[in-house]
Amino acid sequence: MNFSIENIKFNNSPFDHWIIDDFLDIKDAKKLSKEFIDYNSPEDIVHYQGWIAEKKACNRWDRFPPLTYNTFSNLLSVEFINKLTEITGISPLYPDVGLHGGGWHMHGESGKLAIHLDYSIHPKLNLQRKLNLILYLEEDYDPAWGGSLQLWSHDEEKQKPLKKVTEVAPRFNRAVLFDTTQHSWHGFPEPIHPPEGKMRKSLAVYYLTDITSTAEERYRAHYERI
C-alpha cells in the first residue's frame, strides 16, 4: 500500500499540524471506508457517552478486515515512521502497536468530542505521546454536517483552552497529523448531524517518543467544557 505525502500543508498555529490530502490511493480509501464495522453493531465496540463524547471505537486487531489490518500494519511500520521523521523532523518515534485509544473511530447522529488534551505518558509503555495521525474515511462527507476538528490555543495562566484558532474539515481521504506535546487542545464539541447511513469515521494511529521535559503527569485524556 502506498501513502501519498506529496500534498502536505503545514501550520504551527495554534500548534504544529500537517494536513495531507489524497493520502491513499482512491480505490484503497473507498475499500477501507466499506470495511468499517456497522455503527450499531453490538460486538467489539467501545461506546463513549456523556458530555465528553458520543463516540464508538474499536482497536481490536482480530476484528479488523484484511485491508484495514494491513493499513494499520503499514502505518506502524519502520518505513512509514521514517517518512514521518522526514516530514516532522522528530526522532526517535516509536509506534503504538497496541493502538491504545486508537483504531476505528466512529461518530453518528449527535456524535461529538469535547475539547481535550490527550494522555501525555503512555500508561503501559512509559513513553511520551508525540504525534497523532487521523485519516478520515467517510465518502462525500459534507462539513455542513459538523465534525470539523477544532484546534485551540492554550491559556497559560488558567491552563485551559483559550480560543479556537482553526478547523480542519474531515474530508474523505484526508489525513491530519499533529504534535500532542504543545498544549494541543482539540476536538469537536458541537454534535454532528449527518444523514441516515452516513457517519464521521476515521482511522487513528499514535506515535511515541522518549520522555522529555514537555511530558506531564497525565495518563489519560483531560477534557474541558467550553
Image (tube, rainbow, N blue to C red):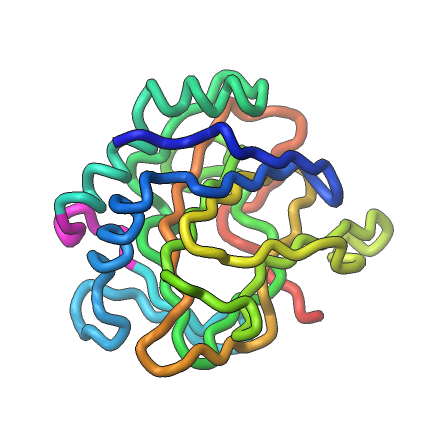
Residue at the limit of the structure toward the right, as seen here: 157
Residue 192 location in percent, x, y?
Answer: 51, 76
For residue 205, which quarter of the picture? top left
* Residue 198, x across and y down, in percent: 36, 73
174 relative to 216 in the view: left or right: left
Q: State yes or no: residue 55 in magenta.
A: no
Residue at x-position 39% and y-position 75%: 108
Q: How many marks?
A: 0
Residue 196 versus residue 72 in the image, above or below: below
Q: Quadrant of residue 57?
A: bottom left
| Residue 59 in magenta stretch | yes
Q: Quadrant of the C terminus?
A: bottom right
In the rendering, at what x and y percent does residue 124 appear? 37, 38
Give, as a single range, the part of the protein colored magenta.
58-65
Name the quadrant of the N terminus.
Answer: top left
* Vertical relation: 113 (above or below) 168: below
Write the residue at 28% across / 39% down: 72
Seen in the image, is 27 located left or right of residue 198? left
Give whichever of 14, 220 is nearer the camera: 14
User: Which residue is drawn at the image coordinates 49% and 80% (left, top)?
Assistant: 193
x%, y% of residue 31?
22, 52
Q: Is residue 219 left or right of residue 46?
A: right
